[in-house]
Amino acid sequence: MKIKDSVFIVTGGSSGIGKALAALLKEKGGKVVITGRDALKLEKVSKEIGVEGHLAHMTSDEDLQKLVDSVMNQFGRVDCLINNAGIGEFAPVDDLNRAAFQRIFETNVFGAAILTSKLISAFKSQNYGNIVNIGSSASVKGFANGSVYSASKFALRAMSECWRTELRPHNIRVMHVNPSEVTTAFNKQDRIEREEKDNKLRPFDLAFSIVAALELDDRAFIPEFGVWATNPF
Ligand SMILES: NC(=O)c1ccc[n+]([C@@H]2O[C@H](COP(=O)([O-])OP(=O)(O)OC[C@H]3O[C@@H](n4cnc5c(N)ncnc54)[C@H](OP(=O)(O)O)[C@@H]3O)[C@@H](O)[C@H]2O)c1
């Protein structure tokens, strides 16, 4: 796809991977709408990178409908949805509880599913679209204390596979991206971004690889890829 003049929705664009991706898409001439759940931060970041900010909690169907309506009213189309907003909680199997699964799945799985569902009629009527689900290395491999988070990312990956099969006949490309550790505010209570380190993945590394995948000619797409740091140890 051509990034220039295409319309993008990046959920969780107020921080980390989503913010770096939104900034790069904007730099390449895209029309970008980012979402977040903290109004002040969203306003600050959207001004900083020159994109539209739209307050939308992934757990609210009403917020997600307003987001879709606002993008369609303003641009009349949408070319790419990036399902990036995500949270994590980590606990040993002895300490699992229903509420933790509900909290994480509400954002990482249900929110992504409902927002995508609400955009499908627009994609189908355009006979064109792109969906990028931001999974994790935890989408393909479990790890100690990762039951809740990893289950949510496996679930997102399962949806990526289902949507890909359903939507290819409508020229809608569904991609699933599995980053390993990236220095962001992920899982930080204070929501302050971690400092970049020479040997760890930066948000920009993810932005760069996702844009490269999107820029493939529309006849082709990369269904799924991982991005790892070369030597993070
Ligand atoms: N960092 C890593 O090591 C890593 C590795 C693999 C995969 N990932 C995945 O990458 C994605 C982006 O994470 P990140 O590392 O960039 O983390 P981040 O810096 O914490 O950013 C997360 C973004 O999602 C937003 N968000 C979270 N819950 C939301 C909700 N319920 N409604 C609306 N917005 C919500 C946050 O908004 P606020 O700023 O308003 O809180 C923020 O903009 C996530 O899906 C994560 O699982 C991250």
Image (cartoon, grey):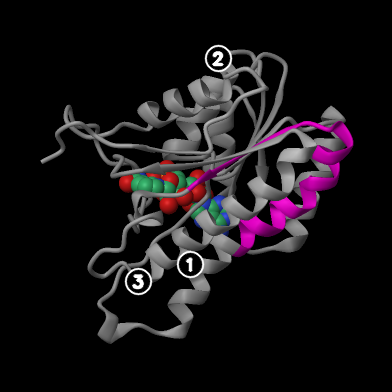
Residue shown at 60% from the left, 22% from the top:
50
Q: Secondary structure at mark 2?
A: helix
Is residue 23 covered in magenta?
no
Q: Position of residue 107 (x, y in %)?
A: 55, 61
Observer-nearest of 17 and 137: 137
Q: First in sequence: mark 1 or mark 2?
A: 2
- What residue is shown with label 3? 147
Q: Horizontally, is 233 left or right of 129 in the view?
A: left
Observer-nearest of 140 and 8: 140
Is residue 115 covered in magenta?
yes
Q: Position of residue 63 (x, y in %)?
A: 73, 56
**What numbered label is drawn on residue 27?**
2
Task: Report how far apart the C-alphas of labels 1 and 2 lie in the structure.
Answer: 32 Å
Q: Quadrant of residue 132?
A: top right
Q: First in sequence: mark 2 or mark 3?
A: 2
In front: mark 2 or mark 3? Answer: 3
**Which residues, given as a range, are shown in magenta?**
110-134
Q: Secondary structure at mark 1?
A: helix
Residue shown at 47% from the left, 75% from the top:
101
Say what amino acid the circle numbered 1 marks.
Ile
Q: Which image quarter is the N terminus in?
A: top right
Residue 185 in view = no
Q: First in sequence: mark 1 or mark 3?
A: 1
Q: Quadrant of residue 31?
A: top right
In the image, residue 207 sits, relative to residue 91, either above or below, namely above
- What residue is shown with label 1? 104
In front: mark 1 or mark 3? Answer: 3
Q: Horizontally, is 172 left or right of 111 in the view?
A: right
Say what amino acid the circle numbered 2 marks.
Glu
Task: Report how far apart the C-alphas of labels 1 and 3 lie in the structure.
Answer: 11 Å
